[in-house]
Image: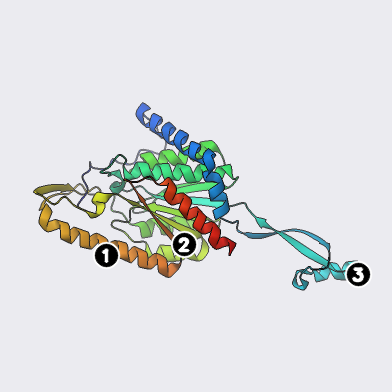
Amino acid sequence: MLGLFKRRPQAAPPANRPPLPADLMRKVRRIEISTKRLVDQGVAGDYHSAFKGRGMEFAEVRPYAPGDEVRSIDWNVTARMGAPYVKRFVEERDLTVFLVVDVSGSLDFGSRAILKRELAAELTALLAFAAVRNQDRVGAAMIADKLEVFLRPDRRRTHVLRIVREALTRREGAHTDLDRGLWATLKTLKQRSVLFILSDFLDSLPQSALKAASARHDVVILELVDPRDHQMPTTGPVMLRDAETGELAVVSGRRARAAHAQHRAEGRAALERLVRKLGIDRLEIRTDRPYLSTLIAFFERRRRRLAR
């Protein structure tokens, strides 16, 4: 994945993690404050209207009334009572939102004001706080070439902060294998969920796992994009470092630019074909543009689609 100007990723910290350094604590707190403000200003409502629960939940049996559908009659109760009774169902709003976050080395890059890793953490926080505000459970998995961390769904604020901290600070330097990491997540995740997958998809397209995920879950892909992921500098020799292996190379910007652009265009076209085939949602979230309007427009499209 040459083309990213980055330091070598750090090894994962031990399971009993020491307190975060003060600068990281401030960053987590800033993300919490900024995303909760957006939730308070209306994102929670937009989110609520865009996603339905797991289906219809049985509520009660009541006497038949003119206009009730015949297919809703509970024939067992009707036989016992000697009069027609119908089953009443309500929409089950209790969602499970699950965030699958790529924590491989490529997310430590950003040519604008924010790294892709920080962008992923902000989006994770925004979606998680919106879910909790609507009394939904939220969980998360951190993946690279395997499942690194699995956080079971919960509704507590402290749980959301744990998810944000993991998304922001966990760095895995191994080669990205989203297919393997996502498969491991699906085997562990028992609840049907709204499944958000956050990654830059630079080196890995999880074809088989994504197909399996879409068969059971409501899948939304958030593709994290930095302009330099797809456009290399045009002048002079450029030293590049692979974010995951640390490999260095010096290339001619002019000669490598066209080949790099073609490679990335082919990768993104493959991703687009896959999501269309599976009928899942995909959003491009960029480091050089505000993401809130993109999310709100997506929620509105979802709401209209569900209202049909």
- Residue beneath disc 2: 213
Where is residue 35 drawn, in percent x and y?
Answer: 46, 39
Which of 238 and 24 lies nearest the eye of the viewer? 238
Q: Amino acid at mark 2?
A: Ala
Secondary structure at badge 2 equals: helix
Query: Going 36% across and 57% down the picture, which residue do you hit?
Result: 178
- Residue beneath disc 1: 266
Q: Amino acid at mark 1?
A: Glu
Position above or below: 51 against 128: below
Where is residue 33 drawn, in percent x and y?
Answer: 46, 33
Q: Amino acid at mark 3?
A: Gly
The numbered mark, 2 or 1, whose residue comes first in the sequence reads 2
| CA–CA distance in space, label 2 to label 3 | 46 Å
Tell whether 196 sits left or right of 202.
Answer: right
Q: Are marks 1 and 3 in contact (CB under 8 Å)?
A: no
- Residue beneath disc 3: 82
Where is residue 299 drawn, in percent x and y?
Answer: 50, 53
Which of 286 and 97 lies nearest the eye of the viewer? 286
Query: Going 12% across and 48% down the picture, which residue do you hit?
Result: 238
| CA–CA distance in space, label 1 to label 3 | 67 Å
The numbered mark, 2 or 3, whose residue comes first in the sequence reads 3
Which of 61 and 225 lies nearest the eye of the viewer? 225
